[in-house]
Amino acid sequence: MKRRTAILISGRGSNMVSLIEAAAAPGFPAEIALILSNRPDAGGLARAAAAGLATATIDHKAYPDRESFERALDEALTQAGIELVCLAGFMRVLTPWFVERWTGRMLNIHPSLLPAFRGTHTHERALAEGVLIHGCTVHFVVPELDAGPIVAQAAVRVLPGDTPETLGARVLAQEHVLYPQALRMVAGGLVRLENGRVVRALGGG
Ligand code: GAR
């Protein structure tokens, strides 16, 4: 049985598209059952609808506080029978209440080799630090921002003359490969979270 998966977005949704494309393969262990955006103008919503997927917007601005927004989010996910959640450029900080409800069942992708460069402007900061290797990380979501047990990482060499844009573009290309691989492993049961640690079966990265 394919695991019913929701993708949460706030923007253009290029990682979302890579997950949708991967999940269209017959043997893929997850099906994308819902695309949820917190922004009505997220470009990814149109791309998801064009792919024939169910979409919904839960506009955080329509709620008085973080928790009532998250209760609406949780209700939409539960109603759609969602088992796994992929954050893909979802730019809302989630409360411990929500994160704990989805512990071990919620992934995020971040454009750096965590634990380096949590937060925003990761490519600028990587260049400013002079690192030679940069990359991206898929991790299980924990209450702490851009932290959490690592499912998979991909490394990118920093090249002479790189700008945040050129470096970011090479990292993004790796994100599009990495996130489907990570979802495949988690949905297929090859990687799971146990007592706060990642447990890998043979073939789980
Ligand atoms: C991606 O680079 C993703 O790693 C990053 O936002 C971008 C979304 O692009 N996420 C974060 O920075 C989360 N901390 P996309 O909408 O084209 O997938």
Image (cartoon, grey):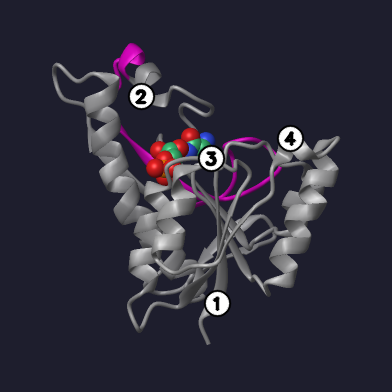
Of the residues under marks 1 and 2, which one precedes in the sequence?
1
Residue type at mark 1? Answer: Arg
Q: Is residue 132 visible?
A: no
Residue 123 numbered tag = 2
> Is 183 included in the stretch rendered in magenta?
no
Which residue of the protein is positioned furthest toward the left in this rendering?
A: 160
Residue displayed at 34% across by 47% down: 175
* Lateral position of residue 147 relative to residue 190, left or right: right
Does 143 appear in magenta? yes
Of callouts 4 and 1, the N-terminal one: 1
Say whether marks 4 and 1 touch (CB < 8 Å): no
In the picture, the disc for residue 3 is 1
Closest to the observer: 35 or 18? 35
Tell me if label 3 and label 4 are in contact, CB under 8 Å: no
Nearer the observer, 47 or 147: 47
Identify residue type, mark 4: Lys
Q: Is residue 137 left or right of residue 141?
A: left
CA distance for labels 4 and 2 = 29 Å
Amino acid bearing label 3: Asp
Residue 195, given in percent of the width and then of the height, sits at 70, 60
Label 3 belongs to which residue? 41
Q: Dot 1: few (<14), some (14–19), or many (≥20) neighbours within 10 Å?
A: some
* Viewer-nearest of discs 3 and 2: 3
Seen at 67% across and 55% down, the residue is 196
Question: Which residues, given as a range, are shown in magenta?
Answer: 127-152
Dot 2, how many residues are within 10 Å of its Cα: few (below 14), some (14-19), or many (20+)? Answer: many
Ligand 1 shown in quarter:
top left
Task: Residue 10: give x, y in percent of width and height.
Answer: 54, 41
Residues at discs 3 and 2 in contact (Cβ within 8 Å)? no
Question: Which residue is labeled 4 in the image?
Answer: 61
Cα distance, mark 4 to mark 1? Answer: 30 Å
